[in-house]
Structures are given as structure tokens and as C-alpha cells.
Image (tube, helix red, strand yellow):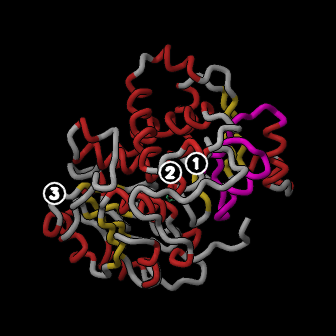
Amino acid sequence: MPARTKPAARQRAAPQNSQAIDFPTKVHPGSALSVTHFTLEDVSEILAQASRLETMPVLRRAQLLAKRRVALLFYESSTRTRTSFELAAKSLGADTVLVSALSSSIEKGESLKDTGITLRALGAECIILRHPNSGAPYLLAHTTGLPILNAGDGTHEHPSQALLDLRTILSRLFPAKQRNSVTARALHGLTITIAGDILHSRVARSNALLLPRLGARVIFCGPEALLPSTAAEIGHGVLIERNFEDALKQSDVVMMLRIQKERLAGLHLDLEDYIQRYQLDASRLSAYAPKALVLHPGPMIRGLEITSEVADGPNSAVAEQVHHGTAIRMALLFRALQTKPTQSKKKSRKR
Ligand code: NCD
């Protein structure tokens, strides 16, 4: 696993259009490590499967992964992601076990590799991993051979969040028949501003790697300390706008991000000035983007990046994001446990 997190712009660029970056060999093909491994066909299948599973009778759904064993391995705290993965697994009938850093042998110094091997020996068939180090899910995938679902790794990626954000955007802004299948032009003409702590955000990274492949324009917005100029090099379709009002004027969707205080060491940020320039409050929203859909991956710090009036207002789809999270995670779990490890991903993939 890389010892240090790479700055956003130095990591590889987003693939163009419908192309996916080759799936790493020896990684179980049911894994979800990065959005860049998904073709647009994969994304469409996940969206369609999420809808099928969501509308399926509860008892039938609970048979699908009956008694399959899913481990949730969380080295960082989480409310939404952990709970929705757990509820998703349970509604498919799987048995779940939570291993968190503070209540396990991780606290005694056990390595990620040994923890993964132990979980596999205990019968885990799939591991959902959240880890502070970018790249940790790759290590776990290689060492266990199990399908690994990345629930957020350092400042790298958060693939299930980007998929649930996509499902929220599709369900709010598009007619029903366009919600379960995407093409390279599915979001053509749509501008999505992601504002706040881009530098530390795996949510921003996964969205910026996914949404432009569907034709969207992504604007990163924030001060230099939280958004280095090189961030736009993440891929085509991503640009930087420092002025929040100018970004809002162009936006159909505004995704607000939390300032990640736990990752701010060494950075100088004047919070009062930040609030002045970048807080999404009702007057800013109504003056510059009155129709924009407002998203936030949570946790929200009300009064800092967003006001309560906006968070609870009519433009906000924050609670819907959480709701879509469960359906997306059911689809990812089903895919993880239905995909055969021996099946050659490359041969079966249409690019
Ligand atoms: C985010 C995360 O942990 O990456 N939250 C989430 O999973 N919904 C964002 C954050 O911590 O600010």
C-alpha cells in the first residue's frame, strides 16, 4: 500500500468516455475499488440492479445472499456508509460482522494483511473496507483474493458514494426511463459544482472521475489551500473556479463538502474568511442558483460549509442521497458475491 497519499492531480487521469481502466489482475472481479474500473455498461448494470433490488418483495430479496458472510472492516468512523452497507447486506439475507479499529486486534498492531487473512479464515466471502490510507483496498484485494468493496480509502476514492450521487442526480433531474442506464452523453449539458475541501475528498475524486465520462461538466470550487490548481488535471471535463458565485451561476447541481479538520494538519485556513466566501446559504443559493439541486455526502457541519436553511430546504437532496445509498450498496454486494473469481474479467468486458 502506498505509504503516502498522492496529491489529486498526480494520480492517473480519468479514462475518456466509455473506457474503463483495466481491472487489476489477481483482484476479484466483483470488487469495487475505484470508479475507473467500471465501464459505462457496469455502471448501468449497477443502477438497474439497484432498482430491481429496491422494488423486489422483501422476503424474496432476503433469499438472494442468504447466509453469505460479509465483513465490514472499518479503520475510520462512519455513520452513513457503514450503516447502509450493513443494512444492504442484511436485506439480501447475508450475515454481517463489523470489525472496527478500536475494538479489535488492529488496536494491538495487527496488520491489514493479517486482519484480512483472519477474516477470510473465519468465512468472510466479501470485505467492505474503510481505511485512512489511500490504496489500502488494493492491498486487501491482493492478499485475500476476496471481493473488496472500497468504502473510502484515504484521499483516494469512495466509489459507492459516487454511484449513489449519480443515482440521486438521475432520479431528481431525469425522467424514469433514463435512470437505469447511462451512456457517454447521459449527463450532457449538466454542470455539477463540487465545493469545499477538494484536496482531502475521496468523494470529490470519485465523482470527478465518473461524472465527466457521462458527459457532465464538473467545476471544482474552493480556495487554493483546499484546491490546488493542478486538481483539474484529474481528467477531461473538470475545471477550477475560485469564485463561488461564478460557479453557482453555471450549476445545475452543487455538491458541498465538509472541511476535513482531521486532515488539515499544516494547512492554514481562516474559517471565518472561508465561511464568508464559500458557505452555501439561502441568499447565495437564491441569488445565483435558485434551481440547483444541493447535495452533500455528509457529515454536514451546519453553519460552516452549509446553513441549516439550505440543508433542510427544497433544493436539498441530502436525505435522498442516503436513501439511494442502500440500493446502490445492495447492487454492489450482489455483484460482489455473484461474480465468479475465476471468470476472466477482461474477456467478458465490452469496452
Ligand atoms: C465522506 C467520507 O467519509 O468520505 N462521508 C461519507 O462517506 N458519506 C465525507 C467526509 O468524511 O466528509
**Label 2 to label 1, Cα distance in Å?**
8 Å
Type of the residue with mark 3: Lys
Provide the secondary structure element on which disc 1 rests.
Answer: loop
Which residues are drawn in magenta?
121-150
Q: Check the image and report above or below for 223 versus 109.
A: below
Res. 184 image quadrant: bottom left
| Camera-nearest label, 2 or 1 | 2
Pointer 2: residues within 10 angstroms few (<14), some, or many (20+)?
A: many
Q: Is residue 314 above or below residue 227?
A: above
Q: Check disc 3 and report its element: helix, strand or loop.
A: loop
- Numbered disc 2: secondary structure: loop
Residue 207 located left or right of residue 169: right
Q: Amino acid at mark 1?
A: Ala
Residue bearing the label numbered 3 = 291
The answer to which quarter of the image holds residue 153 is bottom right
Question: For the residues marked 3 and 2, what is the alpha-carbon distance in whole angstroms?
Answer: 31 Å
Residue at horizontal 71%, vertical 69%?
Answer: 2
Looking at the image, can residue 302 be seen?
no
Q: Position of residue 1 (x, y in %)?
A: 74, 64
In the picture of the structure, the residue carrying the numbered disc 1 is 32
Disc nearer the start of the sequence (1/3): 1
Q: Is residue 108 magenta-colored?
A: no
Disc marking residue 38: 2
Distance, label 1 to label 3, CA atoms, is: 33 Å
333, above or below 114, in the image: above
Tell me if 132 is positioned left or right of 155 in this view.
Answer: right
**Residue lying at the far top of the rendered structure:** 59
In the image, what residue occupies the spot 53% across and 25% down? 91
